[in-house]
Image: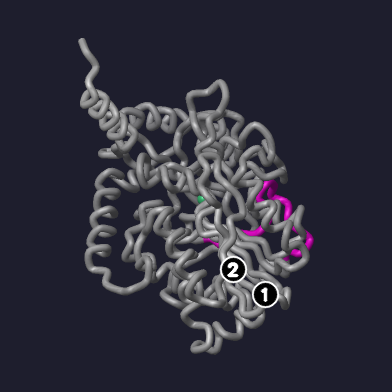
């Protein structure tokens, strides 16, 4: 057989189409488990750390839930294990694939209807490239905005920080945000982009925003995990980790929010590369976590608050996350969180819980929030888990971006004014 040019072309096309094949989540479900005893909570936590089962949320107390994503094939097996432990479950989401199709349809419809002249519609979900184009446009058209490439991901994508400042030379205190460190949590980048847009358009006309920008420099890393985020658009909507190749394993990715040093390798993280909470080979083994570390360290002494945006659960969380112990400044943290949550809830009635991660949510070792607090001295270091509480989970429809962003921004404004 002779090899002709056209044969090569077809091969190349086939290769392209295989890389673009998306994971199909048709008939995949999310089930909710309600543990009733400490023993059951511990069992669920150990199970997550030692398996590749995709936990969507974790119960820290008998008042909260553990949500687990199951394939149609794994459902029977998982249900049997739960039954053996006398754990009841109910089906929370019955078809993740259908939810994803609805989400994509809504994104496409909104795109078709968009007719503004900004680079992107900040009320919709966007790819990594689109968000970067928006930030570049903003930096070139709005004198308040500068961007910097703070680092590079494993696959070579830029990790970009956007700064909004009315006077860079003044060295003001900083309100700092990392968003979308977990790839599938799309609402977090969308909320950060919406807030950037709201601050930049409101400065000079909205007195409250003007005062907040005159008082603080606002810094955002809208997509802290660019490779994972890109992969969640092209290949796997439910991808969580970065895209590190793990030596000796077929499983890809490190959970970046377990790759920080405080309590590294401890409870709530896994040493198995196939786990969704794999902490990596060593603390700061990943370029993405090193980049966040460097950004906070570069502004040492100026970072008044550092907030890591996550979803879902509707929680405002402080340190510690690696243990159930409470930080010395906990009363002050509680006061600030309460101010934020009260204003957030007052917006549309969205109920949030707040407190230390280790007591309200679950023990998670090696997180950003504990690092910013314990190693960088940022007292007001928090994780905010945005909407919802499991109806859509990570696949929050685009129509809920604006209400989520508005209430979150109201919470952040009240919180900032309280600290
Ligand atoms: Zn997360």
Q: Foreground residue, 180 or 130? A: 130
Disc 1 element: helix
Q: Residues within 10 Å of mark 1 (few under 14, many from 20)?
A: few
Q: In which quadrant of the rendered view does residue 116 lie? A: bottom left
Q: Position of residue 27 (x, y in %)?
A: 26, 38
Residues at discs 1 and 2 in contact (Cβ within 8 Å): yes
* Magenta stretch: dominant secondary structure: loop
- 320 sits left or right of 15 in the view: right
Identify which residue is drawn at 33% across, 44% down.
Answer: 91
Task: Please tell me how crowded label 2 is: few (under 14), some (14-19), or many (20+) other residues with Cα within 10 Å.
Answer: many
Residue 379: mark: none
Which label was assigned to residue 163? 2
Horizontally, residue 361 falls left or right of residue 24, namely right
Residue 321 visible here: yes
Per the image, the residue denoted by label 1 is: 168
What residue lies at 34% left-to-right and 32% top-to-bottom?
75
Q: Of helix, strand and loop, which one carries label 2?
A: strand
Check the image and report above or below for 312 versus 243: below
| Region of the chain picked out in magenta, as a range | 315-330
Whether residue 167 is in magenta: the answer is no
């Amino acid at each position: 057989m002779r090899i002709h040019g056209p044969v090569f072309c077809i091969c190349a096309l086939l290769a392209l189409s295989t890389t673009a094949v998306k994971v199909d989540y048709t008939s995949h479900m999310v089930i909710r488990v309600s543990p009733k005893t400490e023993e059951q909570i511990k069992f669920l936590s150990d199970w997550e750390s030692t398996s590749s089962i995709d936990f969507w949320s974790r119960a820290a107390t008998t008042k909260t839930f553990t949500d687990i994503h199951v394939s149609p094939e794994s459902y029977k097996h998982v249900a049997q294990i739960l039954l053996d432990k006398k754990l009841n479950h109910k089906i929370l989401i019955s078809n993740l694939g259908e939810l994803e199709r609805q989400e994509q349809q809504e994104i496409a419809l909104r795109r078709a209807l968009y007719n503004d002249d900004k680079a992107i519609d900040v009320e919709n979900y966007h790819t990594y490239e689109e968000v970067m184009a928006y930030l570049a446009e903003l930096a070139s058209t709005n004198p308040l905005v500068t961007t910097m490439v703070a680092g590079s991901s494993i696959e070579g994508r830029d990790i970009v920080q956007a700064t909004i400042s009315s006077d860079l030379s003044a060295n003001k205190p900083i309100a700092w945000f990392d968003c979308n460190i977990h790839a599938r949590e799309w609402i977090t980048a969308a909320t950060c982009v919406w807030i950037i847009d709201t601050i930049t358009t409101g400065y000079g006309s909205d007195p409250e925003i003007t005062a907040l920008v005159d008082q603080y420099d606002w810094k955002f890393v809208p997509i802290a995990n660019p490779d994972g985020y890109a992969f969640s658009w092209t290949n796997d909507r439910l991808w969580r980790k970065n895209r590190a190749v793990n030596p000796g394993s077929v499983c890809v990715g490190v959970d970046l929010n377990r790759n920080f040093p405080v309590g590294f390798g401890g409870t709530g993280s896994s040493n198995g590369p196939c786990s969704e909470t794999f902490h990596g080979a060593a603390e700061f083994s990943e370029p993405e976590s090193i980049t966040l570390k460097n950004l906070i360290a570069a502004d040492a002494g100026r970072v008044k608050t550092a907030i890591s945006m996550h979803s879902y659960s509707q929680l405002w969380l402080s340190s510690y996350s690696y243990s159930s112990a409470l930080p010395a400044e906990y009363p002050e943290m509680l006061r600030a969180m309460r101010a934020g949550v009260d204003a957030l809830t007052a917006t549309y009635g969205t109920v949030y819980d707040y407190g230390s991660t280790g007591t309200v949510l679950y023990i998670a070792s090696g997180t950003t929030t504990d690092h910013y607090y314990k190693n960088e001295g940022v007292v007001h270091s928090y994780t905010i888990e945005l909407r919802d509480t499991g109806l859509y989970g990570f696949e929050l429809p685009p129509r809920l971006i604006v209400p989520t962003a508005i209430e979150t921004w109201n919470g952040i404004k009240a919180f900032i004014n309280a600290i």
